[in-house]
């Protein structure tokens, strides 16, 4: 197994960072790595905003509810950006473009473009010994984040990423068995693998070093979906000109 | 610079593969790498389908319009999967869950989860000397792909990935200048970088080894958005129980 695959398989989300800023060189490599990801039809339909202003970090930490959004080596916000590819169009051309631009196909394109770039950034950071944590929690109040970063129409925040020197060593979190997520030629209902995973997770949650409890993956998922969350995402997204048709 | 970052920065989409299947060991590492990606709230909201049936490959190649969807070392289809996390729920609990499940927040969650997994797969493959190409072109006829793979409700195909031994060595495609995609603390309109990139791309398109033409990035984007494409994605996505509210 080569060192790249070792880095990938060794991933753990880091939620406690040392009080050391990452270097300019590290940041430069992380952003260059992000940029080299594949992109749909060459759109590069994303923008990355690095947050260095402590006041802005504090607001984002409040939105997220997580202290490591404030206390880390660097904080990135990944945005879907369909504004850049349509800049410099005449008013008439632009109004013709909006039907295509604002459909759910291009909502998908920009979200996927941003995610591919982000995962390259994550792997690049981890390959240098840094830790990362994705922050979907910025979507707790997408409108606030959008305003804070002064995003124009056709640009929306999707998620953040905290980066820095790890200050803890969490357990590597198990994944579903391969049989439950990878199939050949058609979808299969592989309940057996999920049950097996639930048993494994029951043991994991009872025995792990912190926050141990009686739980399974399936129970956790059912609790998650029983709560109605982030129903306001739709409105903000559409107000900004995404996912409208 | 370490070898992982070298692999990432060296990415080129490969569109011509040798007639050699990837090995079971390579495939196993690629899927394990995909599975270790970060996942929103531990949902692992994606499924990967490997296509080995030549008839199915031929149908997907027709949908995509690309010969390398048929002729490669392996073909993966990445799907958003919100079915697995809500399995085994009682009918009553499930009907309560659907409001949350079917909102655009969870459409985003599953698309991002799938994309993070896919990019890990891509980097793992490239680190072993294989080439890859993403296939957003499967969304040319999402309904057909959905049916072909027998995907249940709350599972939709998002994109494919062709993998294999490269049979050509394309140029590394330039990216927008860092100044155009990375900002500090707030969004900036960095038109100067985009103009500079347009000039660079005009030279690139005139001088590259194949398919040379007079073009710029901005012109290419404007042409892309002038055509209305994939307006049927919305209907299929909603019919399958995604992005409904």
Image: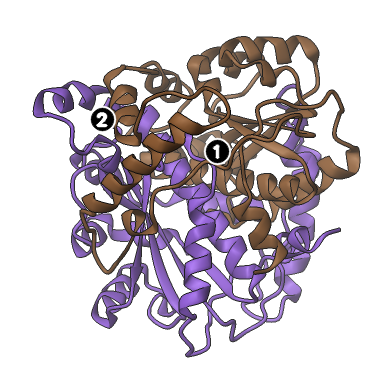
Chain colours: A purple, B brown
- Residue B89 visible in the displayed image: no
In-front residue for pair B233/B193: B193
Rendering quarter of residue B229: top left
Count of all numbered marks drawn on residues in the image: 2
Residue A211 position (above or below residue A215) = below
Q: Which circle marks residue B82 in the picture?
A: 1
Which residue occupies the extreme right position in the image? B24
Q: Which residue is mark 2?
A: A244
Q: Mark 1 or 2, which is nearer the eye?
A: 2
Give percent across and percent down for residue B83: 58, 35
Judging from the image, mark 1 belongs to the subunit labelled B
Give percent across and percent down for residue B147: 61, 14
In the image, what residue occupies the spot 68% across and 21% down? B68
Task: Locate residue A11 relative to residue A108 in the image: left or right.
Answer: right
What distance separates the C-alpha of mark 1 from that of mark 2? 22 Å
In-front residue for pair A100/B243: A100
- Residue B20 visible in the displayed image: yes
For mark 1, give the secondary structure: loop
């Amino acid at each position: 197994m080569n060192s790249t695959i070792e880095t990938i398989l060794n991933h753990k989300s880091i939620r406690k960072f040392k009080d050391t800023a990452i270097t300019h060189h590290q940041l430069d490599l992380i952003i260059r790595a992000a940029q080299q990801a594949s992109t749909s039809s060459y759109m590069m339909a994303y923008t990355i905003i690095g947050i260095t202003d402590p006041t802005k970090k504090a607001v984002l930490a409040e939105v997220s509810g997580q202290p490591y959004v404030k206390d880390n080596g660097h904080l990135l916000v990944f945005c879907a950006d369909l504004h850049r590819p349509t800049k410099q169009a005449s008013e008439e051309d632009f109004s013709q473009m909006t039907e295509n631009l604002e459909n759910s196909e291009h909502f998908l394109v920009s979200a996927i473009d941003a995610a591919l770039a982000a995962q390259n950034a994550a792997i690049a950071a981890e390959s240098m010994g840094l830790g990362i944590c994705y922050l979907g929690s910025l979507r707790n109040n997408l409108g606030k984040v959008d305003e804070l970063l002064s995003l124009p129409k056709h640009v929306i925040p999707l998620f953040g990423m905290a980066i820095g020197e790890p200050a803890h060593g969490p357990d590597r979190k198990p994944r579903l068995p391969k049989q439950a997520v990878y199939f050949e030629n058609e979808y299969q209902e592989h309940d057996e693998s999920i049950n097996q995973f639930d048993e494994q997770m029951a043991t994991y949650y009872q025995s792990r070093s912190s926050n141990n409890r009686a739980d399974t993956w399936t129970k956790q998922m059912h609790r998650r979906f029983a709560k109605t969350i982030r129903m306001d995402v739709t409105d903000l997204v559409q107000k900004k000109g995404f996912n409208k048709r």
